[in-house]
Amino acid sequence: MTKKQKLQTVVSVLIFLVILIIDQVIKISVKTGMTLHESIRITDWFYISYIENNGMAWGMSIMPKVMLSLFRLVAIFGIGWVIYKRILKGAKWLYVALLSMVLAGAAGNLIDCMFYGMIFSGASPNYTSFFVPWGTGYAPFLEGRVVDMFYFPLIVTNYPDWFPVWGGERFVFFSPVFNFADASISVSVVALLLFYRTEVELEIQQLFK
């Protein structure tokens, strides 16, 4: 490897580790310091609201838990391989950094699925979770739940009475609760589509060849 390639590899690993550590520190702090569904008001438009979910980013769920965890694992290896190959081919610094952010976010949520169910007690509105002996937690390997906490209700109002179906009901603009790993994935994916759409399309085309 050239000097540039070695430096890009180091930077990629550092980005990955920093995001992963921040994500896990936040999640463990919330999980062991808050009860399930507890919410802490920071401002009118920002809350720390502790929830857990079985699904993908933003709480979506489209497949069984074990399959989703295995899919994440395969995706992580795939993204890691793409980063390695791009570095060898002289990819731009920002492109490598953004791919590393996607990788770190995916790994952060996978850690929850792989290990949280084995090392933590179940979450409850009545008490905070705590560490338990290995393998005696609330779920088996790959079936742990992802910890989410960031809630940004930027606009809270009601639909007009004349509005079809939801007339008079409560409306919250940007209601998903998410975590640092989700944010890392979302920001980097948007940036990749904005600045490196051609490269991303080529990666996808090569994937399905």
Image (cartoon, helix red, strand yellow):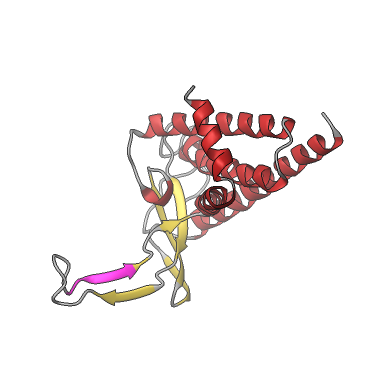
Toward which corner of the image does residue 100 lie, by quadrant? top right
Residue furthest top in the image: 209
Residue 141, visible in the rendered structure = no
Toward which corner of the image does residue 159 lie, by quadrant? bottom left
Residue 173, visible in the rendered structure = yes
Position of residue 114 in the picture relative to residue 38 (left or right): right
The one nearer the camera, 150 or 202, is 202
The quarter in which the N terminus is drawn is top right
Q: Which residue lies at the image location 41% right of the left edge and 46% below the top edge?
A: 122
Picture coordinates of residue 164, whole percent (x, y): 14, 67
Toward which corner of the image does residue 177 lie, by quadrant? bottom left
In the depicted structure, whether residue 207 falls above or below residue 59: above
Q: Specify the segment rendered in magenta.
A: 168-172
Q: Which residue lies at the image location 52% right of the left edge and 48% below the top edge?
A: 193
Picture coordinates of residue 64, whole percent (x, y): 33, 33
The one nearer the camera, 15 or 55, is 15
Residue furthest right in the image: 3
In the depicted structure, whether residue 77 falls above or below residue 22: above
Check residue 177 for magenta coloring: no
Picture coordinates of residue 18, whole percent (x, y): 68, 49
